[in-house]
Amino acid sequence: MLTLLLVAILSVTAALAVGLWRGSYRLAHLAASPWPTRAPHVDLIVAARNEAATIEPALRSMLAQGGLAGPSRVIAINDRSEDDTGGILERLASEYDHLSVIHIDSLPTGWLGKNHALWVGAGEAAGDWLVFTDADVTMAPETIARAVGRAQHQGLQHITAMPTITAHSPWLRIIIVQFAISFLGFFRPWRMDRDPKCFAGIGAFNLVEAATYHRVGGHQAIALTPLDDILLGRLLRRGGAQARLLYGDDLLRLVWYPDAVSMIRAFSKNGFAAFDYRMTRLIAATALYLGVGLLPWLAVLIPGATHQLVAAATVAIALWLQGWFAHHSHWPWQTALLAPVGTVLIIWMWWRAALITLRHGGISWRGTHYSLAELRSHHDRIDWRWPRP
C-alpha cells in the first residue's frame, strides 16, 4: 500500500516538475519588453498604512519613471496611518509636482482598508493606464514604460509581474520557494495566452487599462477580500481582459518580509481566505501537501528497498525543482535541503491563520475587524472560480 501511494506521489511530483519547468520558460521577461509605440498616460496608485520605514525610497523610484507622457502621475493614499507616513508623503509632494497625496481618515462600512484606498486612488486617476503597487516596492526607471509597451504590442489590458524578492533568512527563502511553486502550479499563468480561464495577479505590480478596470467594477467589486491582487486578476479575466504574467527581473524589487516569523504572522489575515474560509478545503490541501511534500522524506527512512527507491526518486525530483527555483531567485540551491521544514511551516501558516480567524470570528487588518460571516459571504458572492458550463 505504501509503495503504491509513493508511486502515485512520484507521478504527481514528476508531472508538476516538468510542467513548471516547461511553463516557466514560456513566461516573458519585463526587461525584454518593447518600448511603447506611443507615450502612455499612466497613473500609479499606491496605498500606504504605517509604511514610514519603506515609503520614501519606494515612492522616489516610482516618481522617477521615464518614457511616460503627461498627465502621468503617482497617487499615494495615506490610509489612516498612525506613524509618519502622512508627513513623508506631504514632504515628497512638495518636491514633486506629479505626486498627489490623498489622506483617508475613516473607512466606510463594507470595505477592507487597502481595497478602499486603491479604489479612491483610481477614482482620482485620469490616465489611460493604472498601475497598482505596494508601498515597499522599488522600480527601475523603465519599468512602467516597458510594461505598457508589452501591453500595446500584444493587445493586452492587464499585466502583472513577479518582483525579485530580497530574503536573507534561509527559512524565509524555503517558504517563498514553496509558495512560488504552489502559486505557479495552481494558476499556471503561462496558459493565459490561450486559456481564458487562467488568471493571475500580484500585489507588487498590476498594470490595468483604466477603461477595463472601471468596466468590471474595479476594487469595489472585491471590496471585502484580503486577496485583492489575485481576485483583481480574476475579475479582469472574467470581464474579457487579455492578460499576462511576466518576470519582473531586477526592474521590480521587494523585501517582502524580514524573516519567516513575520511572513507567518502577516498571513494570519489572508491565509484562510485562500481556502474561501472553508475547513474542508484547508484539510484537503493539508493532506495533499503532507503527502507530496513530507511523506517521501519520511518513507526514505522506513526499511524496504522498493518504497525507499521510489521515495528517494521523489525526493530527488523535489530537490531539483526547489533548488532550480532558489537558483533563479539568486539564492543558494542548498535552500532546497530545507524543503521538509518549509512544508511544515507553510502548513502551520495555513492552520494558524484559520484558527485565529475562527477564534476571533474574523480578521483584523489595518486597524479594523471584519467578521467571518461577512468575509465568507463576500467570497461566495465573488464566485472567483469559473462556473461550470
Image (cartoon, grey):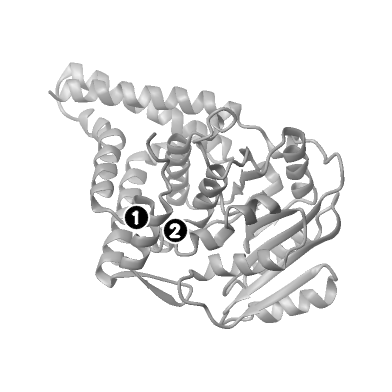
x and y, in percent, of residue 365 in the image: 44, 70
Identify the amino acid type marked 2. Met
x and y, in percent, of residue 298 in the image: 22, 34
Mark 2 sits on what residue?
263
Residue at 69% across, 69% down: 76
Q: Eyeballing the image, is 302 above or below 179?
A: above
Q: Eyeballing the image, is 11 above or below 126?
A: above
**Depth order, front residue of 337/364:** 364
Residue 209: tell me if it is visible.
Answer: no
Residue at 48% across, 37% down: 184
> In the rendered image, which quarter contains the N terminus?
top left
Query: Are circles 1 and 2 on residues that touch, CB within 8 Å?
Result: yes
Mark 1 sits on what residue?
349
Identify the amino acid type marked 1. Met
Residue at 64% across, 77% down: 85
> In the rendered image, which quarter contains the C terminus?
top left
Secondary structure type for disc 2? helix
Marked residue nearer the N-terminal end (1 or 2) = 2
* Circle 1 crowding by C-alpha within 10 Å: few under 14, some 14–19, many from 20: many
Left or right of 185? Residue 72 is: right
x and y, in percent, of residue 306 in the image: 19, 16
Residue 283: tell me if it is visible.
Answer: yes
